[in-house]
Image: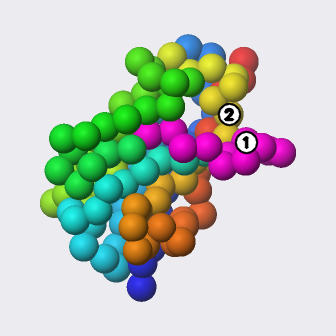
């Protein structure tokens, strides 16, 4: 079955960095656009970054542009989110997701907390 396992979250001070990973399984990972979302308490889920299947098209939310970098390794069925210059408003649970027919599947997410 389709699964996403997000890891790499934690507590970090403002200005710090984290790298999230999402291991996907159960579908042809290399054929699908992948996305990172985040959801803060009391807020709707927000699209953070998108990467096409061959990584030739990448887009970011304005709120993270210049600070976050999305990459993927199709040989490892894994998508990454490098987060630099973290701010308290980046605090949220982060989730990865596949576009298209698998878009209804979600992992457990990984919590990122930015606080001094």
Residue 46 in magenta stretch: yes
Q: Which residues are magenta?
A: 39-49
- Residue 112 location, x and y as percent? 62, 39
Few, some or many C-alpha atoms within 10 Å of disc 1 (few <14, some 14-19, many ≥20)? some
Above or below: residue 73 compared with residue 59:
below
| Quadrant for the C terminus in the image | top right
The answer to whether 60 is drawn above or below residue 24 in the figure is: above
In the rendered structure, which disc, 1 or 2, sits on the residue that comes first in sequence? Answer: 1
CB contact under 8 Å: marks 1 and 2: yes
Task: Tally the numbered discs.
Answer: 2
Furthest toward the right, the residue is 42
- Local crowd at mark 2 within 10 Å, few (<14), some, or many (≥20)? many
Q: Measured from the top left, where is residue 55 in percent x and y?
A: 21, 44
Residue 108 magenta-highlighted: no
Q: Which mark is residue 40?
A: 1
Q: What residue lies at 40% left-to-right and 61% top-to-bottom?
A: 99
Residue with the mark numbered 2:
91
The answer to which quarter of the image holds residue 29 is bottom left
């Amino acid at each position: 079955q389709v699964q996403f396992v997000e890891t790499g979250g934690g507590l970090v001070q403002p200005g710090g960095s984290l790298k999230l990973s999402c291991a996907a399984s159960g579908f042809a990972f290399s054929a699908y656009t992948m996305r990172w979302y985040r959801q803060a308490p009391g807020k709707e889920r927000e699209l953070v970054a998108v990467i096409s299947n061959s990584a030739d098209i990448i887009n970011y939310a304005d709120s993270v542009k210049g600070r976050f970098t999305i990459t993927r390794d199709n040989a490892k069925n894994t998508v990454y989110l490098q987060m630099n210059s973290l701010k308290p408003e980046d605090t949220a649970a982060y989730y990865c997701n596949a576009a298209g027919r698998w878009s209804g599947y979600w992992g457990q997410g990984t919590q990122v907390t930015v606080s001094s």
